[in-house]
Amino acid sequence: MSVGFTPASLAALWQKRWPSGPPVAHTFRSAYADRWVRFHSLPGSKRYPESKDEYAIVLDRYNTVLDELFAGTDVFVVTVDWSGTATGPAIQPEPRQTLHPDGIRWWTESEQDDPDPEFHVHSRLYADRRPWERGCADDLLRAVADDALVEVFLTDTELRRIHHPYDGGADVVLATPEERDRMRGRHIDWLSSHPASL
């Protein structure tokens, strides 16, 4: 895996491409609702895989969409940890540290609304750049499916499309509403029946 970026250049590109907010994955759905679609990972909207066959379905669905988004390109893989201070040790370094050892810290998003510093949270984002190949992120994706990692996302190096897997599915933000509609149409069976598409 190559570096191929600096934290400052990646942060500047993020601010240019996604001006509605920081790279906090759980906010993408509301910030970019006109380009967002959610796919569920298992039939019947089942949340967690319980067998080898179900893990295979989850990874196939993740990788199918990732292939459609990123085949033949490089991607940034982004993971997150948290700390009580901007520079202090991670509250839960594992499994992020083991599963994403090449991640370079490129962004810190601090929540300091509470007057008590003990309740301040600093989300620290780490990115690496790698050629997209089906399966190259399977260890991370499996940890996400098990809810052992959260706030993970993958994006192309121009930050035009985002894939945010979560335990139960993936939120995908496309470059345009039309592109979103085409992708949604290819995977009708993976959509939620919920009125809000959740």
Image (spheres, rainbow, N blue to C red):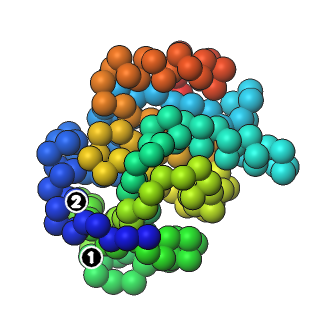
Q: Which residue is mark 1?
A: 86
Residue type (three-letter) at the residue carrying disc 2: Leu
Q: Quadrant of residue 2?
A: bottom left
The vertical placement of 48 against 93, above or below, is above
Q: Which residue is mark 2?
A: 10
Residue type (three-letter) at the residue carrying disc 1: Ala
- Name the spot of residue 95 as percent of width and height, x first: 58, 72
Using residue 43 as the reference point, say whether residue 181 is left or right of it: left
The vertical placement of 182 against 17, above or below, is above
Real-space CA distance between mark 2 and mark 1, rounded to the nearest whole angstrom: 19 Å
Q: Is residue 118 visible?
A: no
Label total for image: 2
- Name the spot of residue 98 as percent of width and height, x first: 56, 77
Quarter of the image with the N terminus in it? bottom left
- Name the spot of residue 79 as percent of width and height, x first: 44, 62
Q: Tag 2's secondary structure?
A: helix
The vertical placement of 18 against 128, above or below, is above
Question: Which one is closest to the eye, mark 2 or mark 1?
Answer: 2
Q: Quadrant of residue 108?
A: bottom left
